[in-house]
Amino acid sequence: MAKYLLLKHYRGAPAPVNNVPMDQWTQDEISAHIQYMNDFADKLKDTGEFVDGQALEMAGAWVRYDGEGKPPVTDGPFAETKDLIAGWMIIDVDSYDRAIELAGELSAAPGKDGKPIHEWLEVRPFYGNPPTITE
Amino acid sequence: MDEALVRSLTPAVLGVLVRRGADFAAAEDAVQDALIEALRVWPEDPPRDPKGWLVTAAWRKFIDATRAETARKRREENTEPEPGPVSDTDDTLQLYFLCAHPKLTPSSAVALTLRAVGGLTTRQIAQAYLVPEATMAQRISRAKKTVGDVRFDQPGDVATVLRVLYLVFNEGYSGDVDLAAEAIRLTRQLSGAIDHPEVAGLLALMLLHHARRASRTAPDGSLIALADQDRAKWDTRLIAEGVEILQNALAKDRLGEFQAQAAIAALHADAPEAEETDWVQIVEWYDELTQLTDSPIVRLNRAVAVAEADGPRAGLKALAELDAELPRYTAVAAYLHERDGDEQTAARLYVEAAGKASNLAEREYLTRQAARLNRKGPPHP
C-alpha cells in the first residue's frame, strides 16, 4: 500500500532504444501506441491499483512572487529547458517491486515498426503517513 | 447517528445471508447496499429491530440482484433462492478469516476486511487510503473473486487476521473515518469471538498507543518524540484497560510478538516521567521479541533501548552489528551520536536521515534536529 509516480518525460530522460519520434510513425503505429497506453490504464483500474493519470502540454510558464501588491512575474516558456515532463500516472501498489514491474510494462509501449520504445520512466515514491507504532 | 451500530451489525447480517445459501460475494454486495440504505433511512425512521431490518433489507437486495442476473442470463427456470432460517450462530470469526485469507495481498485484505467485517462503505475506505472510489471498488471486487472458492467453514489463521488489523491501525490517512478507532473496534470484536492471547496482545498494543495519540503531534502536525510528550495528555483509562488486557494475556503463558510489543508500550506508559522509564526491563522485552520474530527492525529499536539502559556507547555497539540500509538506521545513529556528545556527526547524520525518511512528518522532525544542533555548534565559516 504505497503510492508511486510514474513520470514520463518529453526531454531529460536518457534516450530510449527505439528512438524514432512519433511524427515519423505510421497512423497505425500511433494508434497502437495510444491503445497500449489506454489498455494499460484500464488494466490498473481493473486491478484496483490506479489513482490518476494525466498528460501535460509542451509549453508552460514560470511564475514568481514579486512583492506585496504587485502581480506575479511570469517568464518562459524556455525552449532550452533540459527537463520537460510529459505526463504521469499515479499508482497505489503493495510493493516497490510491483511499481517497478508496472513501470517496465509501461515502457514497453510500441513505437516505430510496432516495436517497444524502451523509453525511460522515472519512478518516484510518495511520502506516506507516519506510522503510529514505532518503538 | 447509528453508523456505529450499523457497522457492528454488518458481519452478523452477512453471516445470516451466507448461511441462507447466498454466495459470499453476492451477499457482501447486498449487505453493503443495505447498510447504505440504513444510513439514509434510519435517521428519520429508526427501526425497532436494527439487525432484523438489515437482514430483511440485505436479503431483498440479494434477491433483486439475483433476479436481475437471472433475467440477464435469460434463464427459464426460477432460481430464486428461498430464505432459510435466521440461525443464532455467530459467523463473525469466519468472516475475519476469509477477509484476511493468505491468498489476498495486504491491501486487498485490508479493504475487504474494512467493508465486509467493518461495515465501512467503499467511499469511506477509498478516502482513507486516498484512491478513487472506482479503484477501491475494483480492489474489493477482485479480492472477493480471489477468495470465491474458499470454503466459509474452514478454520483460518489468526496470525494473518492480526497482521491485517495491525496494518489498519498503523497505516491509512484521514477521511471521515478514524481508522485507528476502527482497528481497535474490530480487534475488540475479534477478541470477543476467539480466546487467543495474541488477539488480546494486539488489542492491548493498540489501546496503549492510542492512549498517547493526543500527545504525539503538535497543533501544527509536527511529531513529538516519546521523551518530549506531555504525559498529562495520555489517556489513563485506555492505559489501564490495555494493561489489564495484557496482564490477562500474559498469564496464559503463550507469549507472542504482539504481547511482547504491548509489554514494551506498557512500560513506557507506566513511567510518570521519561527519566523514570524502566529501560532495563524494556531491553529484556526486546530480547524476547528478537527471539520471537528475528526482525532487524526490532534489533534497531533494541539498540536505542540498550543506549538508554547502558549508555550511548553500548547502544552504538549494538547498532554496529546491524545493516546500515535498514529503515531509520541513520536516524537512530544520529540520535545515539548526539547522546554520546558527538554533535557534529549527529547533525550530519540527521540531515542524511531526513533525506531517507519515508514520510514528511519524519523528514521535518529530523531536519529540525539537524538545525537545532547546527545552531548550537561552532559558527560555520
Image (cartoon, coloured by chain):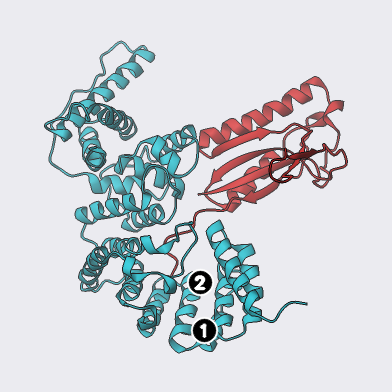
- The spot of residue A27 in percent (x, y) is 80, 20
Q: Name the residue at 77% across, 35% down.
A: A60
Mark 2 chain: B
Chain A tint in image: red
Q: Quadrant of residue A77?
A: top right
What residue is at 62 percent from the left and 35 percent from the top?
A: A53
Return the residue nearer the eye: B217 or A42. Answer: B217
| Pointer 1 residue | B315
* Quadrant occupied by the C terminus of chain B: bottom right
Q: Is residue B237 left or right of residue B349?
A: left
The amino acid type, in three-letter code, at marker 2 is Pro
The answer to whether residue A102 is seen in the rendering is yes
Please state if A59 lies on the left or on the right of B90 as rendered. Answer: right
Element at label 1: helix
User: Relative to residue B183, is residue B323 drawn left or right?
Assistant: right
Q: CA distance from mark 2 to mark 1?
A: 15 Å
Q: Which chain corresponds to the colour cyan? A: B
Rendered view: A34 above or below B13:
above
* Secondary element type, mark 2: helix
Q: Position of residue B11 (x, y in %)?
A: 25, 41
Closest to the observer, B200 or A97 = B200
Q: Nearer the viewer, mark 2 or mark 1?
A: 1
Residue B266 x %, y %: 31, 72
Residue at 57% of width from left, 59% of height from top?
B358
Q: Nearer the viewer, residue B268 or B27?
A: B268
The spot of residue A105 in percent (x, y) is: 67, 40
Where A93 sits versus B17, above or below?
below
Residue type, label 1:
Gly
In the picture provided, is B181 more to the left or to the right than A46?
left
Instruction: Return the residue at label 2.
Output: B296
